[in-house]
Amino acid sequence: MSQDPSLHADTVFDSVAELFSLLSTPVRLKIISALCNGEKNVSQLLDEIETTQPNMSQHLATLYRAGVVGKRRDSTQIYYRLQSERVATLCRAVCTQVASEMDPDSAVDPDQRLRPAPSVR
């Protein structure tokens, strides 16, 4: 019995939407970026990312539950590291593309650049 291809496509789109939802918060993107160069504890992350300690912990817990970051305990410190290189690669690619498009000297055709979504009132 053959599986309906649209069911597979739906699963893929659902999975991608879930991943994009996870990455839709600037603090989480900053955490992923900060961990690209190696593991760090919460204090080190707070030195790089402007947020509160409770907010940082909440985002780290979300990324940990999703399997994006891993953690290890060393005495009283917990160190976080990237667990998912594919998520880091995706973030790097998207952030690099957007930064390129924001550069006024970019070779990207202005008509092809992403524009902010219109606000809904």
Image (cartoon, rainbow, N blue to C red):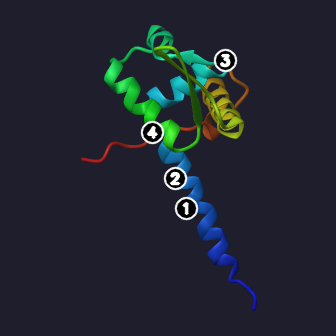
Identify the image quadrant of residue 72: top right
- Above or below, comparing residue 107 to residue 14 in the picture: above
**Tag 1, which secondary structure?**
helix
Q: Which mark is residue 14?
A: 1
Camera-nearest label, 4 or 2 = 4
- Above or below, comparing residue 81 to residue 13 in the picture: above
Residues under numbered marks 4 and 3 in contact, where contact means CB atoms less than 8 Å apart: no
Residues under numbered marks 4 and 1 in contact, where contact means CB atoms less than 8 Å apart: no
Q: First in sequence, mark 1 or 3: give its number.
A: 1
Q: Quadrant of the N terminus?
A: bottom right
> Does residue 110 appear in the picture of this structure?
yes
The residue under label 2 is 18
The residue under label 4 is 62
Q: First in sequence, mark 4 or 2: give its number.
A: 2
Q: First in sequence, mark 4 or 1: give its number.
A: 1
The residue under label 3 is 38
**Tag 2, which secondary structure?**
helix
Between the C-alphas of marks 1 and 3, the distance is 30 Å
Name the one closer to the observer, 96 or 110: 96
Q: First in sequence, mark 3 or 2: give its number.
A: 2
Q: Is residue 91 left or right of residue 119?
A: right
